[in-house]
Amino acid sequence: MKTVAHFNFAGKKVLIRVDFNVPLNQSFAITDDTRMRAAVPTIQKILADGGSCILMSHLGRPKEGPSEKYSLTHLTAHLSQLLGGVRVNFATDCIGETATAAAAQLQPGEVLLLENLRFHKQEEKGDEAFAQQLAQLGDFYVNDAFGTAHRAHASTAVIARFFPGRKCFGFLMHGELAGIGKVLNGAEKPFTAILGGAKVSDKILILEQLLHKADNIIIGGGMAFTFVKAQGGNIGKSLCEEDRLDTARNILQTAKEKGVNLYIPVDAVCADNFANEANRQTCAVKAIPDGWMGLDIGPETEKLYHEVIAASKTILWNGPMGVFEMENFAHGTKAAADAIVWATANGAYSLIGGGDSVAAINKYKLADKVSYVSTGGGALLEYIEAGSLPGVDAVNAEPAQA
């Protein structure tokens, strides 16, 4: 795949799709700049070549056009800091006279940030005319927004067709795709996938794919109780998708037929209410009392999962083991993270993907102790499920020649 490393951008105005969809507090201060920092190497490479960068991104889910809450103007000062003091110009729209004039005035070594793409409904509709207006701003197109690569939006999937022979991936996209490729296509065995979260229905497609690739699949989070009930266990008032019990049984049967070890919790930390200060007890996962709910894996499950993870050479983690946002039900997720860190230190390749898993690994300050932390949860899952992404296919179609 062609990346910015293959080109010299001297004198070029490079239109870069970045993913600056970062969380802001009520004062519009950035609370997590991970996605912005991830884009810096690509921007710096182009500037160092003597090119200029026109950055386009979305922020949040604006419903009724422009609003201060979702304006990218809140990001300019911090982006300038990340770029070592480079001035970041801002255009109050992403198309039209304002954007055209700002792009025309841009000089080599300068950066222009366009206003939120989603202030125009045509972005999410994948509108071709809108994409063409964006394309007119630059000489070359770079997609470095893995977090939105699964969306067939104007700035990710449609715009690339207006840059025949003048498009490539940024360093972030290359890193993301290389990491997933290593897990899905070049996984050193044993390969263990750890899946958590609330619902089996959210993970059916990824489970089906992993049953063809993984040696071990570890189940945690609320989705585990659907599997427990499917096997005849009593789960009290734990989360359960009643309409997915047959699905769970089918997954268990397929795993058995394929020789995949599918691990379900053996015990759980239970509560009499969905609250951090609720009364707690540890129960066998198949014998949770009526009126109680499982909110975390228990100590025996932690030991079991640690042994499996520690013996692994490739690890994919998507989804927490419990309600880790509540301190009293975070121990299982922290234990899983620690096991992954231990395995990584002993030679395993570990890929962390999905919003909650990334939040957990960052919460415990362990991101630098695993192999790769993905910036795109939805994109990661869809890539595993489908084997491709609209934003990736668009750049790979007639790629640029270095």
Image: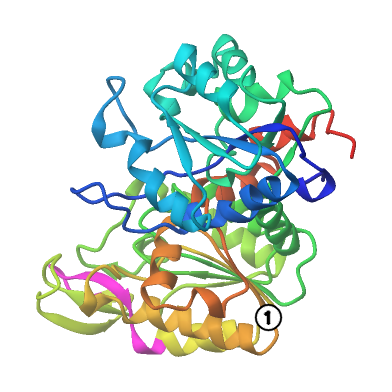
Between 6 and 235, the residue placed more toward the observer is 6
Q: Quadrant of residue 66?
A: top left
- Magenta region includes residue 4: no
Identify the residue at horizontal 84%, vertical 33% (top origin).
400
Q: Give residue 301's position: percent from left, percent from top.
A: 42, 84
Would you name the residue on which mark 1 appears?
348
**Res. 273 visible in picture:** yes
Q: Quadrant of residue 359?
A: bottom left
Q: Give residue 338's position: percent from left, percent from top.
A: 47, 84
Drawn side of residue 78 relative to residue 15, left or right:
left
* Amino acid type shown at disc 1: Ala
Q: Which residues are magenta?
A: 288-300
Identify the residue at horizontal 45%, vertical 48% (top origin).
202
Identify the residue at horizontal 51%, vertical 85% (top origin).
339
Mark 1 is surrounded, within 10 Å at the Cα level, by few (under 14), some (14 to 19) or many (20 or more) other residues, namely many
Which residue ends up furthest to the top in the rendered image?
Answer: 129
Between 28 and 309, the residue placed more toward the observer is 28
- Magenta region includes residue 296: yes
Q: Give residue 179's position: percent from left, percent from top.
A: 69, 61
Between 258 and 277, the residue placed more toward the observer is 277
Drawn side of residue 138 relative to residue 151, left or right:
right
Image height of 162 relative to 142, above or below: above
